[in-house]
Image (tube, helix red, strand yellow):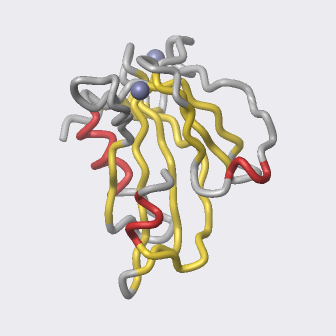
Amino acid sequence: MTLRMVAGRPIAEDAEDLRHWLSSLTGCPSVTRAVLATCEEPVHDEPLTWFYVEADAQAGVARRRCLGCGRTRHLLDSEEHWTAPHMWQCPGCGQSIAEVAVGLHEADDRVEWVVVAARCVECGMISGLTDVLVDRLPLDEVLSRI
Ligand SMILES: [Zn+2]
Ligand SMILES: [Zn+2]
């Protein structure tokens, strides 16, 4: 793992570093699993990992739009209480394309907490996007809705 800090913000070399960063968060429920968000629409030869993201940390909602096919996916039940936040922009370089990873806190095979972070594909800066308490959902269900 090769995290550097620039002006107090972590910089990740690649998506793997983003997952490591989520797994090492402190001051919150422990992240027991960190998953890179992908778009696996049949139009893609292989899963894509570049997205535009919108997230509201206060409301605990997020969604991402695949750069390749334009398909939008909401995090969990975000669509039901969507607050129309601004599109994420990298605080380091200002552009808006990100890799997205989701950290999960699991207990007894149930997911209790979800945290979402983005990595700027241009400069590598990591941004925390939002986190959501989850009502002990099965892992498979959560993985299908991130
Ligand atoms: Zn896609
Ligand atoms: Zn950037």
In the picture, residue 69 is in which quadrant?
top left
Q: Quadrant of the image for the N terminus?
A: top left
Residue 113 spot, x, y in % from top left: 52, 68
Residue 21 spot, x, y in % from top left: 34, 47
Q: How many marks?
A: 0
Residue 84 spot, x, y in % from top left: 79, 34
The relative height of residue 2 versus residue 108 in the rendered view (above or below) is above
Residue 9 or 47: which is nearer the viewer?
Answer: 47
- Residue ID at (71%, 47%): 79
The relative height of residue 29 versus residue 70 in the rendered view (above or below) is below
Residue 7 or 97: which is nearer the viewer?
Answer: 97
Left or right of 140, for residue 66:
right
Left or right of 29, for residue 109:
left
Residue 46 spot, x, y in % from top left: 22, 28
* Residue furthest bottom in the image: 108
Residue 47 or 113: which is nearer the viewer?
Answer: 47
- Residue ID at (34%, 36%): 40
- Residue ID at (51%, 35%): 127
In the picture, residue 109 is in which quadrant?
bottom left
Left or right of 101, for residue 91:
right
Left or right of 74, for residue 31:
left
- Residue ID at (43%, 50%): 102
